[in-house]
Image (cartoon, rainbow, N blue to C red):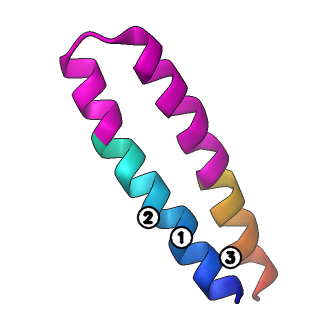
Amino acid sequence: MVELLIKGHEQVVKTSREVFKLSQKADDESTSSLVSDRMRIHEKTSWMLRATRK
């Protein structure tokens, strides 16, 4: 179950990075900020989940 959660969070991070690049190209600061904040949360949660499985 933890592995499934890790994969889900990592997929959100991957998608967020793509959206972040697009929002920067579009000069959309609000979206960039929102995506950056969400990405940071999912990166941290993914890291914490990986740390618990060891």
Amino acid type shown at disc 1: Gly
**Label 3: which secondary element:** helix
**Image point (28%, 44%), residue name:** 18
Give the labeled residue for mark 1. Answer: 8
How many angstroms separate mark 2 from mark 1 (CA)? 5 Å
**Image point (29%, 23%), residue name:** 23
User: Percent from the top left, x then y, of residue 33?
Assistant: 50, 20
Q: Which mark is residue 50?
A: 3
User: Percent from the top left, x then y, of residue 20?
Assistant: 35, 32
- Horizontally, residue 6 falls left or right of residue 14, namely right
Count of labels shown? 3
- Chief SS of the magenta region: helix
Q: Which mark is residue 51?
A: none
Q: Is residue 29 above or below residue 53?
A: above
- Horizontally, residue 16 falls left or right of residue 40, namely left
Q: Which residues are magenta?
A: 19-42
The mark nearer the N terminus, 2 or 3, is 2
- Horizontally, residue 17 falls left or right of residue 43, namely left
Q: Is residue 38 above or below residue 11?
A: above
User: Image quarter for residue 11?
Assistant: bottom left
Q: Residues within 10 Å of mark 1 (few under 14, many from 20)?
A: some
How many angstroms separate mark 1 from mark 3 (CA)? 12 Å
On whether residue 30 falls in the magenta region, the answer is: yes
- Residues marked 2 and 1 touching at CB (< 8 Å): yes
Give the labeled residue for mark 2. Answer: 11
| Quadrant of image for the N terminus | bottom right
Q: Is residue 28 above or below residue 19?
A: above
**Label 1: which secondary element:** helix
Amino acid type shown at disc 2: Gln
Task: Name the front one of labels 1 and 3.
Answer: 1
User: Image quarter for residue 29?
Assistant: top left
Residue closest to the far left:
25
